[in-house]
Each structure stands twice: as C-alpha cells, then as structure tokens.
Amino acid sequence: EAGVAQSPRYKIIEKRQSVAFWCNPISGHATLYWYQQILGQGPKLLIQFQNNGVVDDSQLPKDRFSAERLKGVDSTLKIQPAKLEDSAVYLCASSSTVTEAFFGQGTRLTVV
Amino acid sequence: GNSVTQMEGPVTLSEEAFLTINCTYTATGYPSLFWYVQYPGEGLQLLLKATKADDKGSNKGFEATYRKETTSFHLEKGSVQVSDSAVYFCALIEFNFGNEKLTFGTGTRLTIIP
C-alpha cells in the first residue's frame, strides 16, 4: 500500500514570508495528524482531523498557522507570516485505528 | 494529560552491546504503547507496539514489554548493529471516543560504533 506522501521535502524562506505544506494520507484513513518536530525534540501535535473535521487544534498557533483537510482526504498546513522559531520538520501522519499511525517523510522548513 | 518520559540521550554503544532505552508513561486509562524509529533523513517508522498489559512487542531483534504496574515500556535489544543507529521515540495513544492523540517522548539518539 502507498504510504503517506508529503511535499515539499525541503523549504527555505525568509521570516515574514508565507509557506504551505501538503499531505496525502493513506487511502481510507480517517484520522490525519500534523506534527511539528523541532531539532532535538519529540514531535508536537499541531492539529488532528477526523475525516474533514478538526478534533484537536489546541496547540496550533492560530494567529499564524492554519490547516484544512479537503473532502476528508488531502490536507494543507500554512504558516503566514513565518518566524525564525518555526524552523522545524513538519510531519504528517494518518491512521485508521487507535493502534497505529503511519508517518510521511516530513517537510524540513528553514526560516532565515 | 497523558505524557511520555524517555531516557535522555545521546546513547553511544559498541556493536554487539546490549541496549536498553527506558520509557515510562502517565495516562488515565489503558493506552496502547509504541516505539517509533527515525533513521537519518527518513520519516518516523513504527518499530513495535503493545496494546495491553503484559503484551510484548518485538521487531528486528528489539523487544518491549507493557508493564502496567510500573507504567513502563522499556526498549531492549540483545546485540546492536551499526544499522540500528537512529533516534528512537516512545509514544502512546489512549482511547478517547474519537479524540485519540498520539503523544511522543522527546526521543533518544542512539549511535552504534563498529
């Protein structure tokens, strides 16, 4: 089965610019997660979707971050405007049960 | 809320040494427990899991036993190889009526030297 696809793999932007990441989950997976992984830290959940509804966005900095899941399938995560501290790897994951989540390779964002 | 505490790294071992990476958790109920591995330049991969007390997850020579009495899920391997060099994350999911969240520890970087 195809895995979770993310693009782009790498992105370098200047602070105050905007950026968008895309995720295509495994077909049929109802749950989609976006995580932020800062260097040397564990992944931190930003937002969780169940189909196209938001289940948890309590740690999403809503003044600059936004996310949507179109028709309960693909998802985009946007940052506008970016700050230096947003430099991290952004991971997308999907799951169909509570017993496993599958991760994409991530997008490494560098804000300069 | 739920949390995972992992042994701090980095950990450096010689090839064929015995490995233990400690993991303890805090949860209100009965979570499923996981070890994920992140090889250099790659995404997170599930290494092994256990879904109830006393279950043992195993894969690629790694093992971890779900110990409810000590709220632990320590990762072990009897003889490590250079190819095991990676970052290892302990994680849990607890059933919460559709609001299940995958919570991670901070990760332990393992380096195996020949």
Image (cartoon, rainbow, N blue to C red):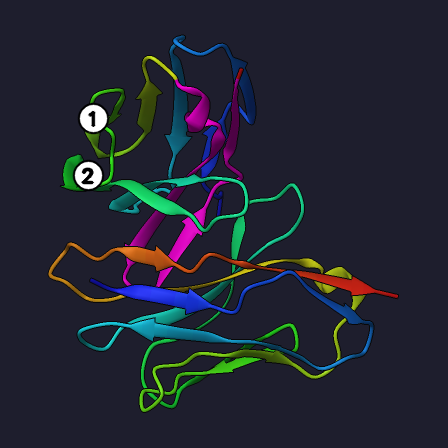
Name the residue: 42% across, 47% down: A43
The residue identified by callout 2 is A57
Mark 2 packing: few (<14 Cα in 10 Å), some, or many (20+)? Answer: some
Q: Decide: is B56 above or below A87.
A: below
Q: Do tags 2 and 1 sit on the same chain?
A: yes
Q: Which residues are magenta?
A: A83-111
Q: Is residue A84 left or right of residue A64?
A: right
Q: Decide: is A91 above or below B29.
A: above
State the predominant SS element of the stretch in magenta.
Answer: strand
In the rendered image, residue A90 lying in the magenta stretch gets the answer yes
Residue at the extreme right = B114
Label 1 chain ID: A
Q: Is residue A54 left or right of residue B12?
A: left
Name the residue: 40% across, 25% down: A22
Name the residue: 76% across, 61% down: B83
Name the residue: 64% across, 51% down: B39
The residue identified by callout 1 is A62
Q: Are marks 2 and 1 in contact (CB under 8 Å)?
A: yes
Numbered disc 2: secondary structure? loop
**Residue A59 location (% of width, % of height):** 24, 40
